[in-house]
Image (cartoon, rainbow, N blue to C red):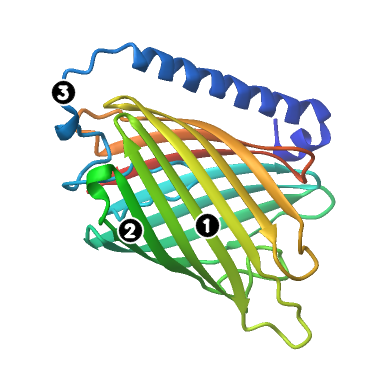
Amino acid sequence: MTLSTCNANPGCSNRIRRAGLALTMLALSATTAGAQEVHERAEDSHEHADDHDHGLHFAHPIFTESASPDTKIRLDYARTWEEDANENEVEFEAEYAFHRSFSIELVVPYVSLNPDAAPSESNLGNVEVALKFANFAFEDSGVLLGYGVEFGLPTGDDEQGIGSDHLWEIEPFLNLGVKQGDWEIQAFSVFGIPTNQDEGEEIETEFKYDLSTLYHVSDRVQALLELNGEVGLSGDEAGEGVVSLAPGLKVAPLADRSLFLGVGVSLPLGEQEVDATLRVSAFYHF
């Protein structure tokens, strides 16, 4: 079924929601099965699939960023069903950790829009460059504090409605990671500040927040449940926001666990323009 057909068919979004609920049940079932396993390794030397550095390290969620710096490449495909248009996105991400406390990240998205009443449009989205810092002062307690800033570059196209060709985004953020045994909780708060507006263009700032709960079912299986939201702070969308819940699952197909494959479905809470987003990810750690 094509995207435009799906958008015109009211039952399609219901099937996407049912798929998300099925994925939720799969993740919960995997979590329950994993809790019954006998873990023979000692807790103080407990190593998981994404732990390629010594000390406290966090696995990567699917819709939420990881709190700890890492060296990796990542490739995502996302399909979003919206009220009057559908979107496909292929996103390449590369991150390099110069030290376990600092990394630089580059994200390059390519977006294809498929409106119901207009021809399809494709273009490079806004390229993002992020500086991520981590504080390990509370490492012995399984707590990581982080902060940083992300820059959105004007590599999009305003006429096509894909990113922007003149706005620069500055997004300072704070994050927190808590790791206890097989459980990981990661939280992010981000302020989005656009700059370089055209004359008469309104400034629209926003606040984003993300929460991820991840359970290591085994060394090669991770179950996730993520909450992602954003709200406008100024401009036409001030006070308006969206919140989504996203179950997901990650699996390592190789014995060395350097490669992880993940899938997640983001479902809005309440009536929103977006019906659902399906994201498939591949993570390779060095």
Q: Position of residue 105 (x, y in %)?
A: 37, 62
The amino acid beneath tag 3 is Arg
* Crowdedness near tag 1: few (<14), some (14–19) or many (≥20) residues, C-alpha within 10 Å: some
Q: Is residue 168 left or right of residue 76?
A: right
Disc nearest the viewer among 3 and 2? 3
Is residue 63 in view from this perspective? no
- The residue wearing badge 3 is 41
Is residue 108 in view from this perspective? yes
The amino acid beneath tag 1 is Ser
Q: Say which of 163 and 97 sits in front.
A: 97
Where residue 185 sits, quadrant-wise, is top left
Where residue 258 sits, quadrant-wise, is top left
Quote the CA–CA distance across marks 1 and 2: 20 Å
Q: Position of residue 269 (x, y in %)?
A: 71, 37
Query: In the rendered structure, which disc, 1 or 3, sits on the residue that comes first in sequence?
Result: 3
The amino acid beneath tag 2 is Glu
Quote the CA–CA distance across marks 3 and 2: 30 Å
- The residue wearing badge 2 is 95
Residue sitting at x 70%, y 24%: 15
- The residue wearing badge 1 is 189
